[in-house]
Image (cartoon, grey):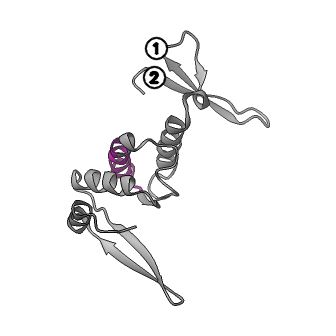
């Protein structure tokens, strides 16, 4: 959101949870982050989770939830950049083809490892199929199902 100039955390005393407050060029007074919609709240949550996972692991369930498909590429780019800077290994789930395509494009732009893992069930076993960056590029280009 280009109108946002700052984000601060307030509260957190006693039983009150901390609240994210946003300064926006569009409003005179700061507003709670929650008033800016699901997408921005989701992005803030992912960024904060990456910082908290420094040197470790982050699990993102249903990556695309709350995000418009047009911003997913930029979100993946930010995840790749922050994960590299903070030494975080990220595992994300998705059922969205838009999220897969955005992941593939962002992965192609980075030197970091990026693998899509498709899980399928065969009898009582879960079978992983790995798609490295080059294989994923072919799959998304040709519309091969990887979800």
Q: Is residue 31 left or right of residue 6?
A: right
Q: Residue 85, relative to residue 1: is it above or below? A: below
Report the span colored magenta.
Answer: 73-88
Q: Quadrant of the N terminus?
A: top left
Q: Is residue 119 above or below residue 100?
A: below
- Tally the numbered discs: 2
Residue wearing tag 2: 4
> Image quarter for residue 140?
bottom left
Q: Is residue 84 magenta?
A: yes
Relative to 113, say whether 22 is above or below.
above
Q: State yes or no: discs 1 and 2 in contact (Cβ < 8 Å).
A: yes
x then y, percent, for residue 113: 28, 62
According to the picture, the residue beneath numbered tag 1 turns out to be 25
Query: Which residue does the image show at 49% across and 18% down from the upper left?
Result: 24
Principal secondary structure, stretch drawn in magenta: helix
Q: Residue at x 22, y 64 (%)?
A: 142
Task: Judge whether residue 52 is colored magenta.
Answer: no
Q: Residue furthest bottom?
A: 123
Q: Among all residues in the image, which is located at the extreme right?
A: 15
Q: Earlier in the sequence, mark 1 or mark 2?
A: 2
Residue at left offset 42%, top offset 58%: 90
How crowded is the residue under tag 1: few (<14 C-alpha within 10 Å), some, or many (20+)? few
Q: Residues within 10 Å of mark 2 (few under 14, many from 20)?
A: few
Image x and y of residue 48, in percent: 51, 42
Q: Secondary structure at mark 2?
A: strand
Helix, strand or loop at mark 1: loop
Q: Disc 1 versus disc 2: distance between alpha carbons?
A: 6 Å
Name the outermost residue toward the top. 28
Position of residue 55 in the picture relative to residue 13 (left or right) = left
């Amino acid at each position: 959101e280009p109108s946002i100039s700052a984000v601060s955390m307030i509260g957190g005393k006693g039983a009150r949870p901390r609240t994210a407050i946003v300064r926006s060029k569009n409003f005179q007074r700061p507003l709670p982050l929650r008033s800016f919609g699901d997408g921005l709240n989701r992005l803030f949550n992912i960024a904060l989770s990456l910082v908290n996972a420094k040197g470790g692991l982050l699990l993102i369930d249903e990556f695309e939830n709350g995000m418009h498909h047009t911003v997913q590429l930029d979100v993946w780019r930010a995840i790749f950049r922050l994960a590299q800077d903070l030494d975080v290994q990220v595992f994300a789930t998705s059922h969205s083809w838009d999220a897969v395509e955005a992941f593939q494009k962002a992965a192609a732009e980075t030197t970091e490892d990026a693998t899509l893992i498709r899980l399928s069930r065969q009898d009582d076993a879960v079978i992983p199929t790995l798609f490295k960056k080059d294989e994923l590029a072919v799959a998304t280009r040709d519309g091969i199902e990887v979800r």
